[in-house]
């Protein structure tokens, strides 16, 4: 279990591997969200040339998860 602040992007790296994991997200307060297939996200990132921004986000997430795991 983890805690995320909004706004939050979950599963950005899903296009890298083909393993399917089902998960549930729960909120403490009412919120909204939407599902974007990984292949669509990949294409949007490619079309807008946002790879640097996408990998900065992934690096931050990996850093935060690493800090969490060290606790």
Image (spheres, grey):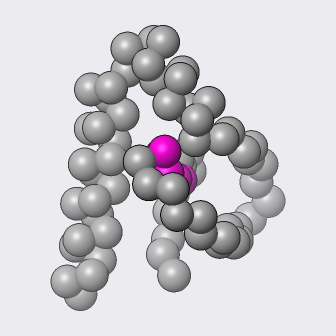
Split into 4 quadrants, where in the image is the C terminus? bottom left
Q: Quadrant of residue 28?
A: bottom right
Q: Which residues are magenta?
A: 10-15
x then y, percent, for residue 31: 76, 54
Q: Quadrant of residue 62?
A: bottom left
The residue at 36%/34% (across/down) is 54
23 left or right, relative to 41: right
13 left or right, relative to 70: right
The residue at 22%/60% (across/down) is 63
x then y, percent, for residue 57: 34, 42
Residue 28 is at least partly visible in this image: no
SS assignment for the magenta stretch, majority: helix
x then y, percent, for residue 50: 37, 21
Q: Is residue 11 magenta?
A: yes
Q: Is residue 53 magenta?
A: no
- Extreme residue in the bottom direction: 71
The residue at 66%/70% (across/down) is 22
Decide: is 71 above or below 54. below
Which residue occupies the foreground of this view, 33 or 45? 45
62 left or right, relative to 38: left
The residue at 54%/21% (across/down) is 44
Decide: is 17 above or below 1. above
What is the tally of numbered marks visible in this picture? 0
Decide: is 39 above or below 51. below
């Amino acid at each position: 279990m983890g805690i995320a602040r909004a706004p939050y992007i979950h599963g950005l790296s899903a296009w890298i591997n083909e393993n399917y994991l089902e998960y549930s997200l729960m909120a403490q307060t009412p919120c909204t969200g939407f599902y974007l297939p990984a292949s669509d996200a990949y294409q949007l990132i490619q079309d807008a040339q946002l790879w640097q921004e996408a990998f900065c986000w992934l690096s931050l997430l990996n850093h935060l998860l690493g800090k969490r795991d060290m606790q």
